[in-house]
Image: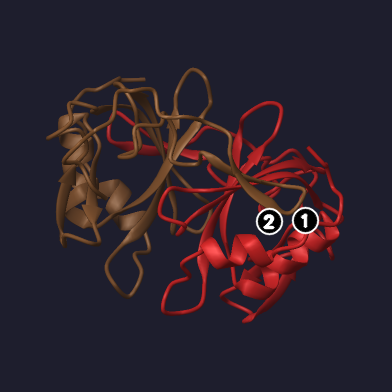
Chain colours: A brown, B red
Amino acid sequence: MTQGATQDASQLLAALRFGSDGLIPVVAQQHDSGEVLMLAWMNRDAVTETLKTGRVCYWSRSRKQLWRKGESSGHVQRLVELRVDCDGDALLVLIDQSGVACHTGTRSCFFRAVRDGALIEIQQPSGAAAPGETR
Amino acid sequence: MTQGATQDASQLLAALRFGSDGLIPVVAQQHDSGEVLMLAWMNRDAVTETLKTGRVCYWSRSRKQLWRKGESSGHVQRLVELRVDCDGDALLVLIDQSGVACHTGTRSCFFRAVRDGALIEIQQPSGAAAPGETR
């Protein structure tokens, strides 16, 4: 496995089925701990850039532009491996997350859980919040 | 934590932001190994049923109906915990997967990876294929 190296995206792109909005959902998982950190979206350009640079780049649906994760916060995601699901309509990126993944300052965006019917916070901000970085 | 018990979905539903199609993406992760098994979708009814029954129920976009995972294959997903992301627009279900998650017979739907620019299969069907179950 080539980690972080430049990879051509053409074969991958041919296998993907983007939605009518041109986007595909992407699950980001810390490569060693297995923690699911966030779910975001990529368009074709974001997929291409991620493979080319070895740093994860999403498409921000709110800002309607490429979102080079960590560009403002420093909390970059180094790509370890990119995986594709059976139907080609979802991606899984195994990453090495610098700092925290969530703009709220928590390590994972999935910091709330339903327990006994109540939605509670199970993870607190680490203090390393990422001001200025929004999804 | 109440595992598999009936839970009321009203507080959760109030925190969720469904897409314009009424759906929310859901990442399914094996609760003990951390393996990401699949990405699928839920509507409000699927969320409610999943919490009520303790078995994961999705919305099938292809069949346009509730998809009680494993109903035809026996490969059910017992809900261990349901988590919500920061924006309320993605779910993570920690599950106990019976058999395989993928309709192709592989344990995970994410059985292909990009390595040196080529898309290769990194996981083979276990022989426990799930005929009749489609996404």
Q: Residue at x 85, y 57 (%)?
A: B6
From the image, which quarter does the C terminus of chain B lie in?
A: bottom right
Disc 2: host chain:
B
- 10 Å neighbourhood of mark 2: few (<14), some, or many (≥20)? many
Disc 1: host chain:
B
- The answer to whether one can see residue B69 in this image is no
Query: How far apart are labels 2 and 1 at the CA level?
Result: 5 Å
Secondary element under disc 1, as helix, strand or loop, is loop
Where does the image place residue B45, in percent across and percent down from the top left? 68, 74
Which numbered circle lies on residue B103? 2
Which numbered circle lies on residue B130? 1
Q: Mark 2 or 1 closer to N-term?
A: 2
Where does the image place residue A45, in percent across and percent down from the top left? 16, 53
Q: Residue at x 76, y 59 (%)?
A: B51
Where does the image place residue A109, in percent across and percent down from the top left? 43, 40
Residues at discs 2 and 1 both on one chain: yes
Which numbered circle lies on residue B47? none
Q: Is residue B62 above or below residue A126?
A: below
Where does the image place residue B133, in percent across and percent down from the top left? 74, 64
Q: Is residue A50 above or below residue A1?
A: below
The answer to whether A28 appears left or right of A2 in the picture is right
From the image, which quarter does the N terminus of chain B lie in?
A: top right
The answer to whether A103 appears left or right of B129 in the picture is left
Secondary element under disc 2, as helix, strand or loop, is loop
- The answer to whether one can see residue B86 in this image is yes
Q: Are marks 2 and 1 in contact (CB under 8 Å)?
A: yes
- 10 Å neighbourhood of mark 1: few (<14), some, or many (≥20)? many
Inspect the image, locate mark 2, and give the three-letter code of the amino acid beneath it.
Answer: His
